[in-house]
Image: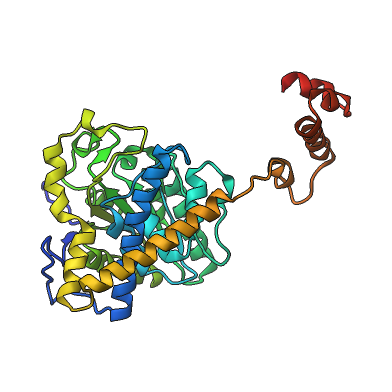
Amino acid sequence: MPRETISIPNRVESLSILSADGQVDAKLEPKLGDADLKKLYKTMLSSRLFDERLLQLQRQGRIGTYGPTKGQEAASLGAAYVLKKDDWLVPSFRETAAMFWRGWPMEKIILWWGGHEEGATVPAGVNDLPLCVPVATQCLHAMGIAWGAKLRQDGTVCVGFVGDGGTSEGDFHEALNFAAVYKVPLIMVVQNNHWAISIPRHNQTAAQTIAQKALAYGMDGLQVDGNDILAMISACSEAAERARTGGGPTLIEAVTYRLSMHTTADDPKKYRTDDEVKCWEPKDPLIRFRTYLVRKKLLTDKTQVEIETQIQEELRAAVQRAEAYELDRYGMFKYMFAEMTADLQRQMAELRAYLENGAAAAASAPGGERVSRVL
């Protein structure tokens, strides 16, 4: 038997449409309406200003630990843009721009980072899952949703997100392997921001690209300039069309950069240099898209101020609504089952007695002596 090179039918490509200085490749430029372009820009800017506001809230002790999205707005928004209303989006936790596009109100996300379960309740009519911090667990959720879509034959697709660090987790590989074998309508977007907290991308994998991992599973892979909103829209549009027509899943590596810290519990100065960050600042997706819109005469200094003013007012109102939220102390009993069991009713009564009247009252409730000792 001769030694031969194995022919692999799947392909891996790279795509960039909008250069760092806002120059566009006219042959690859997607045909988007002016209204959509303006809405995309406002959504990206909303995500950036939201990011800045939540950092302030965290430093003031008004929310818990927060994970910034600065510099990664285009990677998620481009994917969300191509989805239809009935399609599904499964985020990690740096997909704020995508969630805004899909209809999540600002206060929901503020509540989530503030530790309230209400922030994990999906808005009515939105086919999304809530934010997910455990690394790569959402990959299997996204694959499962896509598998369900295939079984239902309803023509919907699912977009899932994970970071470059998540590609080292078993859940990521299991999800892609299953997705390819059963040809489910899944688009898996890896936000390669070069850092998994303090672990650089080159310590995650020896592969030249993350996109090429698709070949091992038998699917197409595409490395995209994740700071280029036009490239992300084109790449995800192509992947969505393939998925809807029975062509199976696609792995998209969105090459971007985390311009801020991993979370507010992290000090990036301990593991990366300021010079490295400065090299990426000119590639900022927001600045790049702004330059593109100015050249198309869709954005001026005046309209920029008007948009920022509008967003700041939306942010002010959202923070006010979030901080006015009243926690239901008894929600943990009410929503475990469709109807509360007798045990849950008793436990809720014990807690209510303790909170309203103190330990003595709780102890006098049926079974309350044990509860009061614990409390």
Q: Which residue is painted at 49% across and 59% down in the image?
A: 317
Quarter of the image where one finds residue 270: top left
User: What is the tally of numbered marks visible in this picture?
Assistant: 0
316 and 351: which one is in front?
316
Q: Is residue 115 above or below residue 320?
A: above
Q: Which residue is painted at 29% across and 39% down in the image?
A: 261
Q: How is the image coloured?
A: rainbow
Where residue 17 appears, as percent x and y from the top left, is 16, 67
Where residue 180 appears, as percent x and y from the top left, is 37, 55
343 and 292: which one is in front?
292
Say whether residue 183 is visible.
no
Q: Which residue is painted at 21% across and 66% down in the image?
A: 289
223 and 324: which one is in front?
324
Say whether residue 209 is visible.
yes
Quarter of the image where one finds residue 276: top left
Left or right, 119 with respect to 185, comes to right
